[in-house]
Each structure stands twice: as structure tokens, then as C-alpha cells.
Amino acid sequence: PGGIFSGWLFGGDRTGATLTLRAPYGQFGLHESNATMVCVAGGTGLAPIKCVLQSMTQAQRERDVLLFFGARQQRDLYCLDEIEALQLDWGGRFELI
């Protein structure tokens, strides 16, 4: 909400508009290590990080995690219940900041 694309998308009738979508740039994934995992997410950027954390929980892998999750406003933070559930199931230290 409030972003450039969101403003354009919801700022008028976009019926028939053409969008060009591209794949994400760069690399994203989990590097094997015993070091504390530091995750930084803003807004919808939480989605891929949450998937990695969920798969690590299912695999019962123990690794400390610091998750920095932010949004423009407190009310824009989402999935907090799911993150809390991950914290409870986590095999190591898991801090949400």
C-alpha cells in the first residue's frame, strides 16, 4: 500500500492494461552454515524468507535466527501469528526484531 505500483494500480480503472513482469534479479537461498542467520524483510519481502524458515523447521535444522521485519506502519505487519508459531517450533534461538 502506498507504493508506486500500488498507487498506479488502484488509482484508476486498469481494465485492459498491459503489464510486463520480470523475474526477480539476483540470488536468494539458504547457504549452509552454522552461523546465525540474519534475515531482513520489508512488506511482501517476508514471503520468501518465511518459506525458507518453514522448510528449515520441517527439516528440524537448528540454527539461530535474527529476523528483522518492517513495514511503513505497524498495522502493515502481517503473518505475525505464523512467525510466532515458527519461533515456538524453532530448534535454536529465534528473535523477531
Image (cartoon, rainbow, N blue to C red):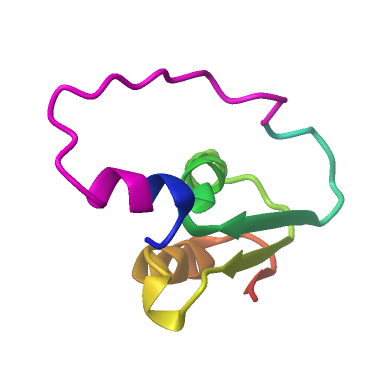
- Residue 88, relative to residue 44: is it above or below? below
Q: Which residues are magenta?
A: 7-28
Q: Main secondary structure of the magenta part?
A: loop
Residue 4 picture location, percent across and down: 46, 50
Residue 57 picture location, percent across and down: 52, 48
Determine the residue located farthest toward the bottom in the rendered image: 74
Q: Report the residue at 36% width, 50% height from top.
A: 6
Residue 42 colored in magenta in the image: no
Q: Quadrant of residue 40?
A: bottom right
Which corner quadrant holds the C terminus? Answer: bottom right
| Residue 71 vs residue 93, the one in the foreground | 71
Q: Quadrant of residue 96?
A: bottom right
Q: Report the residue at 36% width, 53% height from top.
A: 7
Q: Report the residue at 49% width, 58% height from top.
A: 43
Q: Report the residue at 52% width, 68% height from top.
A: 87
| Residue 66 vs residue 86, the one in the foreground | 66
